[in-house]
Image (tube, grey):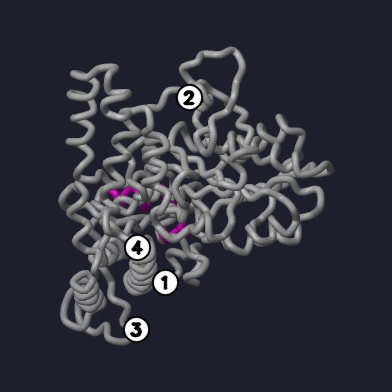
Amino acid sequence: MSEPTRTSEPAAARPRAGAPLEPDHGAPGTAGGPGGSGSPTGDLAARAAALDAADELAGLRDRFTLPDGVVYLDGNSLGALPATVAAATSDVVTRQWGELLIRSWDESDWWTAPERIGDKLAPLVGAAPGQVVVGDSTSVNLFKALVGAARLAEAAGPGRTTMLVDAATFPTDGYIAASAARMTGLTVLPTDPADVPAALGPDTAVVLLNHVDYRTGRLHDLPGLTRAVHAAGAIAVWDLCHSAGALPVGLDAHAVDLAVGCTYKYLNGGPGAPAYLYIAERHQAAFDSPLPGWNSHADPFGMTPHYAPAEGALRGRVGTPDILSMLALESALDAWDGVTVEAVRAKSLALTDFFLACVAQYVPQGTVEPVTPAEHERRGSQVSLRTENAREVMRELIARGVVGDYRAPDVLRFGFTPLYVGFADAERAARTLGHIFG
């Protein structure tokens, strides 16, 4: 998050450092002073402790390195550091690079890292092996996917001239989509995901959607929308940046065509960690990447002047893999050993439900407005709250040890990563927000 700047603010929304929490005397079971028996603080803190004690995933927090005294709710921007990564990265630098030098391409198996790590990541997005390749950034992979999708649509028959793009998409996705459309002769039509079925037609070539809206945390209907896209004869491309590692995706089960995502959010791969590209097996032979590189050549060391794509998802590779960050990601994914995405999703919903209940108790009525859908089937793993002076409020929260982030102009975002966030964290975050507005 960029450093917030101060803005003028009305007194009603101005944070007051150290302000006491005012109990909601109108709510049941809230009699007594703050923190005392029967108070909202005491009741919710006790409930948080009980939920943490019963949480089967609570021990996973030990798989991460987190600073003492900090509630970290920004895993939807940058995941916490898995405890194994420092040693693994040190080995890559000091032994593999430092001692083995170029031999590590073979002896340390650097060469196969993109597809090997892709197969390790694949179960977290519901993909069988051989369909995910890791490397490059989300933006680069999205460009490959969109141009490749347009070429698949063109090969299927003439007359498809439009690309539907999530109207609220992350800005870079929109920029990439516009460029890909110019390159392939398509026209971009910004469309709310809910309106996609009605907007589809015989001229639709490609549809780009976000599984979870980055600003609001709204979860979109991947199975239903993918079916609608296919019924119209178009290609579905999904951005999984805010869902992979937080909830079941089911790429294979729902017959998604192409998908991309980053690994530094809920997958905890580290800042700038390589992204991934999913190419459904049925499309691999026909997938025509707009970025052919020597790493995706059928004979990469043949150094021939003419390009021949490799078989399978390997044609999604481009240039030399970024080994340091890629092998850090490989170690980071060890944090998922023995963990199911379904269990993570169950805890995510419980955490966000509990956080919203705490906000309702602790924060003065009318001060914040939840913009994340209340319905489980429409909620990702974050809670977004709209409030005046959100930038300044988040700055004060961070100063008090609760780290979330802010999106212009008025949204506080709190990302819940169930592998290391607990119910006491959720209670403290809401209580601290209540103190700021108290």
The residue lying at 52 percent from left, 66 percent from top is 378
Mark 1 and mark 2 lie on one chain; the one further toward the N terminus is: 2
Q: Which amino acid, by three-letter code, is at mark 2?
A: Asn
Of the two numbered discs 3 and 4 in the rendering, the one whose residue sits closer to the viewer: 4
Q: Where is residue 79 drawn, in percent x and y?
A: 32, 46
Of the two numbered discs 2 and 4 in the rendering, the one whose residue sits closer to the viewer: 2
Q: Where is residue 25 drawn, in percent x and y?
A: 31, 82
SS class, disc 1: loop
Q: Which residue is mark 4?
A: 344
Q: Which residue is mark 1?
A: 365
Q: Which amino acid, by three-letter code, is at mark 4?
A: Val
The quadrant where residue 95 appears: top left
- The magenta stretch is 381-398
Does the rendering let one see residue 363?
no
Instruction: Using the image as rendered, state which of residue 349 and residue 256 is in the foreground.
Output: 256
**Looking at the rendered structure, which numbered label has been put on residue 295?**
2
Does the rendering let one see residue 436?
yes
**Looking at the rendered structure, which numbered label has been put on residue 323?**
none
How far apart are the alpha carbons under marks 1 and 3? 12 Å
Q: Which amino acid, by three-letter code, is at mark 3?
A: Ala
- Callout 4: 10 Å neighbours few (<14), some, many (20+)? many
Exactly how many numbered labels are in the figure? 4
The residue lying at 71 percent from left, 61 percent from top is 197
Q: Which residue is mark 3?
A: 27
Q: Is residue 209 above or below residue 85?
A: below
The residue lying at 39 percent from left, 68 percent from top is 349
How far apart are the alpha carbons under marks 3 and 4? 31 Å
